[in-house]
Image (spheres, rainbow, N blue to C red):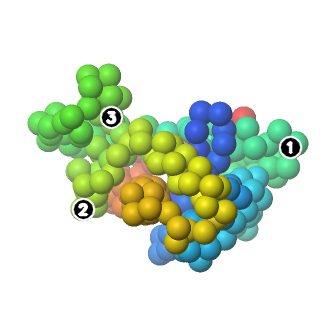
Amino acid sequence: MQENYYYIDYENNKAMDFYLLGYGDELHTKQIILDDNLLGLAKNHNMQVSSALEATQVFLENVYKNDGIVVAYSTAEKQYFNYLNKNLLLNKYRNLPYLNLAKAAKKWIRKYHYDTFLKLPPFRKNADMYMKKRMIYSLGSVMRLTSLKAPSDYAPGKTTSRFNTVKKSLVIKKQDYEKLTAVQKAKATKVLKHNTFDVDALRILRNDISSVDKEIIKKCLITCLD
């Protein structure tokens, strides 16, 4: 029986302000803007604008209809599902299977790539010791074992500040994207590129793990909601 995987990655801050949703299946990656103050960015890139709850409902409904499995890196996206379920509007999707790909990646590395992974240099050489330790098993770092490498401007930890800069600038410029400076436009491009890489990486990594050991995938399945 064919398993249908659906990949998801939110961009948001610690206060649960959502900026962007990236999602996809085995063939396509798409993005939805989740903040009206980023309307200018959405218009410039012909992107849909939606609330985080509505976008999540549409995503989960598609997974539900296709007997799919949600794939995310870590349990962060599950925490966001629970947060967005304050009015219990997502209860229908409570028992959808959720693959914690970060957990699966660690098992895969320890079983098949441990020596190679240990020999890799720090993912970001200029990061302080705290960040270097945090990024050891980050998605970008793990992807060095696959065919898809993170772009040179991929910068974990900077996405929120980049979104905030773009958001503030668009509000000042009344959502006229063309009035942003070259630096501000570059930051907008980088956050979209960052999110696209994350979703594409989930797809590649899941396939790489499944191709050698499907049991790892099975052992890392939980449910979408608590």
Residue at 80% x, 49% y is 90
Q: Residue at x 47, y 75 (%)?
A: 27
Q: Is residue 160 left or right of residue 194?
A: right
Amino acid on which disc 2 is placed: Ser
Asked if the residue at tag 3 contacts the one at tag 1, i.e. Cβ–Cβ closer than 8 Å, the answer is no
Q: Which of the marked residues, 2 or 3, is nearer the chain's N terminus? A: 3
Disc 1 on helix, strand or loop?
loop
Q: Which residue is mark 2?
A: 147
Quadrant location of the N terminus in the rendered image: bottom right
Disc nearer the start of the sequence (1/3): 1
The amino acid marked with disc number 3 is Met
Q: Which comes sooner in the sequence, label 1 or label 2?
A: 1
Residue bearing mark 3? 135
Residue under numbered circle 1:
88
Q: Residues within 10 Å of mark 1 (few under 14, many from 20)?
A: few
Q: How many marks?
A: 3
Residue drawn 62% across the image and 55% down it: 172
